[in-house]
Every structure is written in structure tokens, then in C-alpha cells.
Image (cartoon, grey):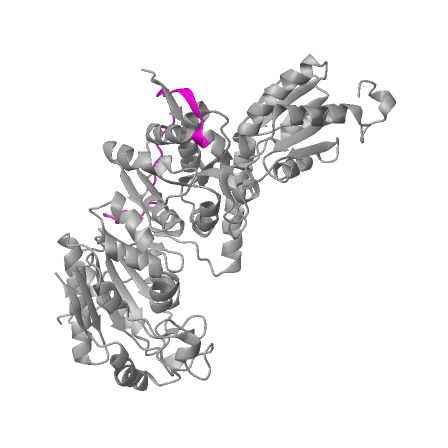
Amino acid sequence: MEKVFERPKSLTDAEFSYCPGCAHSIIHRMIAEVMDELDLADKCVGVCPVGCAVFMYEYMYCDMIEAAHGRAPAVATGLKRVLPDTFVWAYQGDGDLASIGTAEIIHAAARGENISIVFINNTTYGMTGGQMAPTTLLGQRSTTCPTGRSVAANGYPIRVSEMLATLDGPSYIERVAPTSPAGLVKTKKAIRHAFDNQLAGKGFSLVEILSNCPTQLRLSPVDSLKWVEENMVATYPPGVFVDK
Amino acid sequence: MAKRKLIKGNEAICHGAIAGRCDAFFGYPITPQNEIPEKMSSLMPANGGVFLQAESEVSAINMVYGAASAGKRAMTSSSSPGISLKQEGLSYIVACELPCVVVNVQRGGPGLGNTLPGQADYFQMVKGGGHGDYKIITLAPWSVQECYEFMPLAFDLADKYRNPAAILMDAILGQMIEAADLHEDFNYPIYDKPWATTGAMGRSHNIINSLWIDPLVMESVNERLQAKYALAERDEIRYAEYKTEGAELVLVAYGSPARICRTVVDMAREEGLSVGLLRPITLYPFPAPRIAQIAATGARFLTVEMSCGQMVEDVKLSANGATEVAFYGRTGGVVPTPAEILEQVRELFNAPHLYAASEQRGSL
């Protein structure tokens, strides 16, 4: 019988440590599928973040570097500059990229580093227990804003894609919401486009993926995806911000 | 063919980096080390390497992390406040067992301090500096010539031990112009780096990581690091001595103050005072066995630093109570003069020896 579905060869057989219903797993799989399509597993280096995806080096069957919190774009830059023919991608969450690592991502984007960033925005610090993130929505509760994020105390959420799109460096920035089958298809297409851009030498690409954290939202997987659609999309509208 | 040049210590560092086959430099401006990134911005590309001015010292050391992960020889340079910012990255680099070279042209501190010479980063550089149990192999040049020659040595030690190596200078050494012989008589080996993340290209995949959640595994990583340090302490101690044979008082100083102390030794000898100089060249590993040997003769020590007293702690630990260890320091960018150090020497010879009965040591 013909095999119609299997694990991408760019994924190891390690079990994901993610909570049930968390989109990290499916996004990992999509990255692995794109790596398979482009035959990159043997020719690339991935840089993983600090946060829930900290063990990503266990899951991807390719050379991997575990970076310090927020520093993945700098680590990826150092590696790409000395090995310009090696494909380099990095995976970062919102605390990692939009809070402690803002300088690193802005300057990697401004330099137009020829790297591909997959940015997971789930509005929370999932691994440390649901503290307020730079992307936490106004009014959204967290363990460090238990009555809801207020402008007076915490200011406004950061729109990373729009902010980076003001720079001349990036070649491609898109925000996607994999909350439906159509959204999943779009997400994989966006990752593929970001990777294609690096192979074509076009420079910095970033895909912002609106993601769910059922555990910290205290919602079922399905309801957490609905929450993303009903709440996140208004603040973080999907779309293509740069495509050169 | 040897090239003799009149250059600054900071420039000698750059030529030394090229002689040490440096592949990549990442840095950020800070005085008094700016000549290093400025010169490297043309020297690196001219020699087929990478130069990149980072957005911060934090990013610079993480770019070093990335380039070192690729198996390349990478370095950064900075001065005291900038070195503070690099400590997070250095801790990760140590834990990942990556080689790299860090140059610290020390200035006055704490805080923003000033851009004048200082040696108050001894603890930060020599004792680890970031979180966790680790050491940075630290070399202390005292001349422009040594600034040049210690760079290939630092890259070699970094590769040999898969650990960062540092050059600990001060603003005098960085800015001082001296003649240096830019020879190429270095015969350091080339190291295989099968652990590097370069794209697997047919081999099993490599992982550069410093996360070990199993406590026994984490402990074994620490044991592996400590085993390397034990080897370094056995094999890599370097120091120089001047008139220490039979000396009753041995000055201990590194970097620029060691040059001043050599003058003091000659001045004291003219007065008939039996004084020598021990200059640690490796601050880690520290020349503890030699200090202990001298301490056992009953000779006293006077440690001279441009700090409030940092290396003196290692001198005391090495002497382990066998003799008296005195300290003299100036800070904030003030450089001690030979006359004021000589005055300290005279006072010690006039003072009763704290560790031996005075009748047994008539001349003191």
C-alpha cells in the first residue's frame, strides 16, 4: 500500500514536550516539511530560543544551537557571517524576541541578515507559568497582571511585524494565524517563502505566527484557537507587510 | 621575515589576531579599546575574515558564540563596562565548550568610571565573571610585543581547552606605542572541530547546548569542565621573575604596574634592599605553586595593583599563611609611581616581620 503520510525526515522521533493542543508541535512539523522539500536537513543550522521551544534541538534532525534568551538573531548572525553558504533559521517566542531580544531582532532585520526567523506570538510566557508578555493584549490576565493588562501600568502590546516593516533591511515579513485549515496552509506557505528568500540570497525574512497557549489561557485546544481568532487578530492583523 | 613596527598595544592585538588565524571579529565601540575594532574593520576583510560592528556588547559576544559554534576562530574586544555586558554570553560559551578570545582593555571603575588605566576587572575576568562554576584562561601582557604574541597563544589555548581565553590589559598597554617585532614564528597546531554546527553534510547532527535538566548530567558537565581546568593548572601556568633569587621581599604585579615594579626593584637594590619581582603572565591559571615555593623561604610579598586589592587575594591563597602578604594599590585611573611603591618597600623593611621572629631575620 502506498504510504501517504509520515514523519518528515527533518524531525527526530523524540516526543514533543508541548501541552496538548499547543501549536508549537504543528509549527515544528511545518518547518520540518519545508526543510524536507528544500532538502535542507543536512545543510542547515537551526537556532532555538529560551522558552517552551527550548528543547527544539531534540526534535529537529539537523545541526542545532541553543541560544541564550533573546540572543538567537545575534547567534544566527555570527554563524551566517562565517558560513554564508549554510542555511540558518531561528525560532523565537514573544518574550524571547519582542522583550529581552528586541535589540537583536531589530538590528538583524536592519542589517538585512540573510537568515529566516519563525516568530511565535502566543501573548504569554508559557514555560515560566503565564506571566505578562510584551504581546499580552490589553485587558488580558496573566500571573503578573492578574487583573488584566492596563495601559497605565504596562503600556501597549508590541506589533513586531509592523515595527520591523518600517526598516529597509527585511525582504519578507508576514503574519499568519494557523487557527483553521486555510490558516495552516498559509502558515506553511509563509515559512516556505521565508526559506526560499534566504536560498535566493534576498536577506532577512520573518514569519510571525499567532499561536495558542491552551494551558495559560485555561481553555480547551479548540477554544484557545477560537480565542486567538476572536481576540488576537484584532490587535495583530494577519497580512504581508514586506515582500521584496 | 620579521617586521619591526612602532605601534600601539591595541594595534598589536589586531596584528596578533591575524597571526593567530582569527576568522571573525565582533565588537562595539568603547574607550580605551577603539583602535581594535577600527583597525579590524579593514584588517579582517583584507585577510579573508569577517568584521561586524554589533549593536551591543551583548550581541557581539553572542555573534562570537555563533561563529565559534561554526568551528571558526572568533574574538571580541571591549573595556570594563562592556566586559560586564559580555558575561552572560561567556557563561554560555564556556558551558557549550566553545573556544573564543576576549580582549579586555581595563579602565577605571566601577560604573561608568573613566577611560584611564585600571586593573579592577581581575575578579571579573579571572574568577569566572558570569553565572556558574567556570574559569577563563587569562593572559596578562606587559608590553606591546606581548600584546602581539599572546593573541596566537590565546587562540591556541582556547582551541586546546575548548574554553574562552582572555587578554587582560589596561589603558596604558592599549594606548602605549612601542616597537614590536611582528614575526610569524608561531607553530601552534590546527585543531579538528568535529563538534561544530556547520550543516551535518552526511554526519549525524551536532548540537551546541548548555541545558541539562538532569542534575546528574549537569553535575557531570561541571566535572568535565573542572577536569579541563585541572589540566590547565598543571600545564599552562606562565610567569616571569626578576631578581627573585634570595630576595627577602618579592613584588607581585601584572601588566603595566609590573613594569613600574621592575624599576622599583632596581631602585631598592641600589639602597641595598633585597627585592625581586614575580610577574604572573597567566592570571588564570595563577602561578600558585611558585608563590608557595617563595613563601616557604620566608620572603615576604608586596602585591601592587591598579585596584583596591584583587590579585592580592590569590597571592594570599597561594602563600597559604606561610608568609606576610602586603598590598599597595592606586585606583580610578591613578598610576602608582616608582617613588611611592619604593616608599612602601622601605616601610616593609623597617616594620617588624609579622611571621618570623625579628632576631631570626636581622636584616628586616
Q: Along the horizontal axis of the image, is B138 left or right of B347?
A: left
Residue B95 makes an appearance in the image: no
User: Between B344 and B223, which is closer to the camera in this rendering?
Assistant: B344
- Residue B253 rendering spot, x and y as whole percentages: 60, 29
Instruction: Please tell me in which quadrant of the rendered image residue B308 appears.
Output: top right
Q: Residue at x 58, y 35 (%)?
A: B306
- Dominant secondary structure, magenta: loop
Q: Quadrant of residue B356?
A: top right
Depth check: give the residue in front, B59 or A44: B59
In the rendered image, residue B87, in percent from the top left (x then y), is placed at 47, 49
Relative height, residue B313 to residue B300 (above, below): below
**Relative side of A95 to A205, left or right:** right
User: Total marks drawn?
Assistant: 0
Which quadrant of the figure contains the C terminus of chain A?
Answer: bottom left
Q: Which of A80 and B350 is in front in this view?
A: B350
Residue B196 within the segment the image draws in magenta: yes
Q: Where is residue A122 in the image (x, y as percent from the top left)?
A: 33, 74
At 51% from the left and 50% from the top, the residue drawn is: B130
Q: Is residue B94 above or below residue B348?
A: below
Direction from residue B258 to residue B153 in the image, left or right: left
Query: Is residue A205 among the parts visible in the rendering?
Result: yes
Q: Quadrant of residue A110?
A: bottom left
Percent x, y of residue B299: 73, 24
Boundaries of the magenta span: B174-201
Question: Does residue A95 show up magenta in the picture?
Answer: no
